[in-house]
Image (cartoon, grey):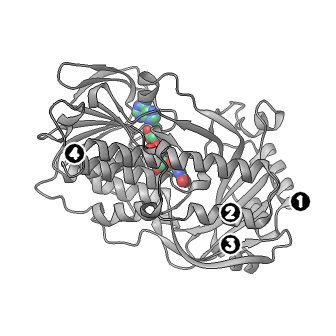
Amino acid sequence: MAQGEEQPGAKLAEGKKHFVIVGGSLGGLAAGLALKELGHDTTILERNPTPVLEHQGAGIVAGGDTLAFFKKYNRCDRPIAVTSHRRQYLDKDGNVTHKEDMDQNMTSWDLAYYLMRTNYDGVENSYCKVPDGKPTDGKAVHLHDRTVTDIQARAAGIEVFWTSSGGEQGSIQADVLIGADGPSSTVRSILAPEVQRVYAGYCALRGTVREDEVSDAAREAFCERFTFFHRRGVQILAYLIPGKDGAVEPGRRLINFVYYTNFPEGSPELEEIMTDRDGKRRRITMPPGLTAPEAWEKQRRIARERLPPQFAEIVCATQRPFVQAVTDVLSPTNEFLDGRVVLIGDALAGFRPHTVASTSQAAFDAMVLAEYVAGKVSREEWKRQTLGFARFIQKRGVDMGNRSQFEDLPLEEHIHDRNVASVPREKEVYPEWATAI
Ligand SMILES: Cc1cc2nc3c(=O)[nH]c(=O)nc-3n(C[C@H](O)[C@H](O)[C@H](O)COP(=O)(O)OP(=O)(O)OC[C@H]3O[C@@H](n4cnc5c(N)ncnc54)[C@H](O)[C@@H]3O)c2cc1C
């Protein structure tokens, strides 16, 4: 549909704008970069009290949209991923029972973050040289320690209110606000308070180990391989990611694992794993290094009993494990207040990690939004594409996760689910319920 004056949001594609972006993680930075490239001014408000977010994540499967995003917007000349050449499944004794040759690219959250930050606002870092700007770039401002607390529609645009950890308060005026503030989005909770983020009944225990510090058997199982093990209530997978400062040379990379295991809501086991070393109950994420030592020691014992030896080895060797409670959340739409507010990434739809699509969604949402803002796609097309992706993949994650954690499936079914999740986005055919706007 052509963009007409009467359409809400149509103004988005007219003239130079100031976009305020709530959230300075991968989604917010991706949107900032794409809009800066179009010549628009952007201000990112990130609640984290320190200037950069780092050492809080681990591995990311870099799907087609993530790679396409970096190809389009990254001006740093360096490798961005490690390639795995085979997907394979182990039995309990550690033997390979199924394998498929297939290239997949894996990166680290820190490398993706620093590449985006340095391209966005020129942050100095040890991953890459700060690239030169272009005269046509819009102004790119990143403000940390800004927790957004409220928004108010104004005659032209929107006012965004924030507080700092020191109690300072302020507001900033935007033409358009982008909510890239993650699965517990404040922006979404103001505009769609009925949306709830719900615990799925299991957690992902995560961590990394250096590839040069594991046994030959573990190196053989995980180096340049995407390796899985399933049993009732358990799924663990591992792959190589760039190491310190984004190193991709053999010997300097990290083995990254994601170990899904059931912790029923309200159970003492869930309380134990989500209570940190200082006794504080973490609701959704236990950051690296804060896991209570006794709770982790117990997980090590369990890992030795029920995982193949190569997987047990890396779980037991990890020094800074972290825990993510797996949750579901989906916003009914991505556009509010006559187009003054747009939601992207996890704020729009928080996927289960099995989909390996969260960063791809953030990258895709940023790219399509930029096309809409540039007048290259219509409002309707932008909504169909981004809502279609959000709803379809969100449901896929729920189905995959529930089948994997709560059903007793033969390995072929798990392989089938994984292969379905690897279909490139351009080849997906979304059902009507996913693209309804
Ligand atoms: C520190 C960190 C580490 C991560 N590590 C991994 C990883 O290793 N592997 C992986 O697959 N995914 C990881 N993720 C998640 C991954 O970034 C997202 O799933 C995906 O990239 C989509 O990102 P997003 O920007 O939409 O949401 P998120 O990454 O969740 O980011 C939301 C951002 O908004 C900020 N924010 C929230 N509320 C407010 C507010 N009221 N005011 C201002 N700012 C606010 C948060 O501090 C956060 O930086 C990580 C996320 C974070 C924040």
Q: Is residue 323 above or below residue 418?
A: above
From the image, tell me which residue sits under label 2. 237
Front residue (pair 132, 31): 31
Give how far apart the Cα atoms at labels 2 and 3 are. 19 Å
Q: Which residue is mark 3?
A: 213
Q: Picture quarter containing residue 413?
A: bottom right
Q: Which secondary structure lies at badge 4?
A: helix
Residue visible at 38% across and 53% down in the picture: 364
Q: Give the number of the mark in front: 4 or 2.
A: 4
Q: Quarter-wise, where is residue 287 in the image?
A: top right
Give the residue displayed 45% in from the left and 49% down from the top: 389
Q: Quadrant of residue 252?
A: bottom right
Front position in the image: 292 or 413: 413
Label 1 vs 4, first from the N-terminus: 1
Q: Where residue 373 is drawn, which disc sits there?
A: 4
Front label number (1 vs 2): 2
Residue receiving disc 1: 305
Q: Earlier in the sequence, mark 1 or mark 3?
A: 3
Between the C-alphas of marks 1 and 4, the distance is: 54 Å
